[in-house]
Amino acid sequence: MIEQSISIERVEEAINIFGSFDENIRIIEQELAVSVINRDSMLKVTGEAEGVMYAVKALEALMSLSSKGEVINEQNVRYILQLVREGRETQISQLAGDVLCITAKGKPIKAKTLGQKKYVEAIRDNVVTLGIGPAGTGKTYLAVAAAVAAFRAKEINRIILTRPAVEAGERLGFLPGDLQSKVDPYLRPLYDALFDMLGAETYQKYLERGNIEVAPLAYMRGRTLDDSFIILDEAQNTSREQMKMFLTRLGFGSKIVITGDITQIDLPADKVSGLREAMRVLKGVEDIAICRLNESDVVRHALVQRIIKAYEVDEDRKEKGKK
């Protein structure tokens, strides 16, 4: 057993790092089998040599983020522990990045992982960006935040959100109501993100003015979209023909972000996913970025990461069994 100490400059920093009821420190103690005690402006870490080394690196990284105004939570702590174990602690300072957008309630939206940071930078620097990754990696939410930021900065005149109306394994049958109420259930995640960023009243105002458009993918045919930020969500459920049609809608002064999860394709078995095809066909094309997010970029409940990992392991096992 060894002991190592780290000095803390401000009480507020210790409060931020420890979290509510010391929940953040408890994660470090459980994950690394160490004991962390705050005494006389010092953090004393006790345990086996390897655990203490990782804990000290993680605590120093958390202090660095805290000093830059970051709020420390469970997701921060688990992600930093992962980076430290992988020997990537030098990259942690990149996480205290620029604010992408401010929500209607004043909450700053930032990239929370290195994968998300690369994704946000790709959206900023390219005309077309493909964001591929599992559920919970912020693909859609960050794309909508980038669209709202561009709209507020008057870089574009319109935000267009679209997705294919494909049922996720169920048969929904007849849906009552007008056309809008029939497509609304498919577009709900996009509405939710926009409400978060703009607030319901502002969203409604822009919708009535035509500055925001939310529509199923079929409505894109035959249009040229200038000065727009266009997001295609759930793109894994497009056909090859739909994807080509969508990409060729691009007009002057516009950006396109395409998001999807190729592990959750709801198309018939005989249909090829347009997103899979686009990843292959567009690789290396100038001004098109292909960003892959993985389970380490998940910013939902920690269990979501473990669920995604378990399914990946099972898929790999099945693939090996076929060979």
Image (spheres, grey):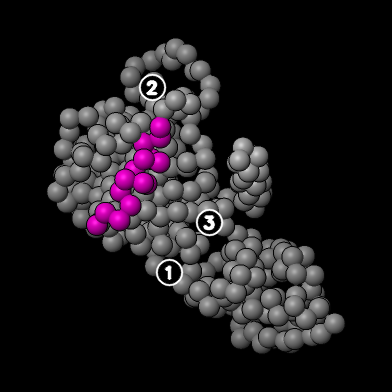
Residue at 47%, 41% in the rendered image: 262
Residue at 53%, 53% in the rendered image: 294
Residue 123 forms part of the magenta stretch:
no
Secondary structure type for disc 3 = helix
Up the image or down, 125 lies above or below 40; here it is: above
Looking at the rendering, the stretch of residues picked out in magenta corresponds to 272-286
**Rendered location of residue 82, percent (x, y):** 62, 66
Location of the N terminus (image quadrant): bottom right
Residue at 77%, 65% in the rendered image: 30
Report the front residue among 153 and 239.
Answer: 239
Q: State if disc 1 and disc 2 touch (CB < 8 Å).
A: no
According to the picture, the residue beneath numbered tag 2 turns out to be: 181
Res. 160 image quadrant: top left
Report the front residue among 298 and 264.
Answer: 264
In the image, what residue type sits under mark 3? Asp
Secondary structure type for disc 2 = helix
Question: Is 110 displayed left or right of 90 in the figure?
Answer: left
Name the N-terminal-most of marks 3 and 2. 2
Mark 2, other Cα within 10 Å: few <14 / some 14–19 / many ≥20: few
Residue 278 forms part of the magenta stretch:
yes
Please give the label number shown on residue 97. 1
Question: Is 176 displayed left or right of 84 in the figure?
Answer: left
According to the picture, the residue beneath numbered tag 3 turns out to be: 297
Residue 307 is at least partly visible in this image? no
Please give the label number shown on residue 286. none
- 3D distance between C-alphas at marks 1 and 3: 15 Å
In the image, what residue type sits under mark 2? Ser
- 3D distance between C-alphas at marks 3 and 2: 33 Å
